[in-house]
Image (cartoon, helix red, strand yellow):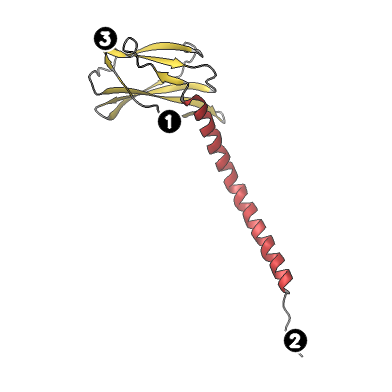
Amino acid sequence: MNNKKGISTIVATVLIVLITVAAVTILWSAISPLIDRNLSEGTACFDVQNKLKIDTNKQYTCYNGTGVYYRVERAANSGSLEGFDVIVEADGETNRIISVTDMTALTENGAKTYQNATGLSGADVKYSIAPKVLIDGEKKACEASTPVEVSVCA
């Protein structure tokens, strides 16, 4: 007679399934908050990305002897917009980042012209805008818009 003792194949299969379920549960509890945070950040940025832009009209976005002027337009329903960064590029490199946090003058469905005495002028000066949104109580900068070339005022 054979005196070997072991677990049956049914018990072994059940144990493997339980271990797998436990491992997936542990992994999901660690990864889920990361996914949720990235999704909320992406959604908030997507909501405001196309609702804040630099006007390309040469009457508003241009340079002269006193400085550079740029007009920022804000569309209606622009979400949780908390401010924006204006990125100044000269000769293909970021030269300056101007942070605007006071949004009282730039209301929804409105526009405001800003002046910047950067000392930069010429064909290679470009401005882009990166909205800032509030996510989990913290301001986050979204991706910058396509740079707008600044030319001589009309």
Image location of residue 114, percent across then percent down = 37, 12
Image location of residue 30, percent across then percent down = 59, 48
Mark 3 neighbour density, 10 Å: few (under 14) some (14–19) many (20 or more)? few
**Disc ID at residue 143:** 1
Q: Is residue 139 visible?
A: no
Image location of residue 2, percent across then percent down = 74, 88
Q: Is residue 17 above or below residue 86?
A: below
Q: Earlier in the sequence, mark 3 or mark 1?
A: 3
Residue at x-position 37% and y-position 27%: 146
Q: In which quadrant of the rendered image does the C terminus lie? A: top left
> What residue sits right under mark 2 in the picture?
3
Residue at x-position 66% and y-position 61%: 19
Residue at x-position 41% and y-position 16%: 72
Please state which amino acid type lies under the numbered disc 2: Asn
Residue ranking furthest to the bottom: 1
Residue at x-position 52% and y-position 33%: 41
Q: Secondary structure at mark 3?
A: loop
Estimate the spatial distance between the alpha carbons at disc 3 and disc 2, rounded to whole Å: 99 Å
Q: Is residue 19 above or below residue 73?
A: below
Q: In which quadrant of the rendered image does the N terminus lie? A: bottom right
Estimate the spatial distance between the alpha carbons at disc 1 and disc 2, rounded to whole Å: 70 Å
> What residue sits right under mark 3 in the picture?
66
Closer to the eye: label 1 or 2: 1
Image location of residue 89, percent across then percent down = 30, 26
Nearer-the-camera pick, 79 or 30: 79
Closer to the eye: label 3 or 1: 1
Please state which amino acid type lies under the numbered disc 3: Thr
Q: Is residue 93 visible?
A: yes
Please state which amino acid type lies under the numbered disc 1: Glu
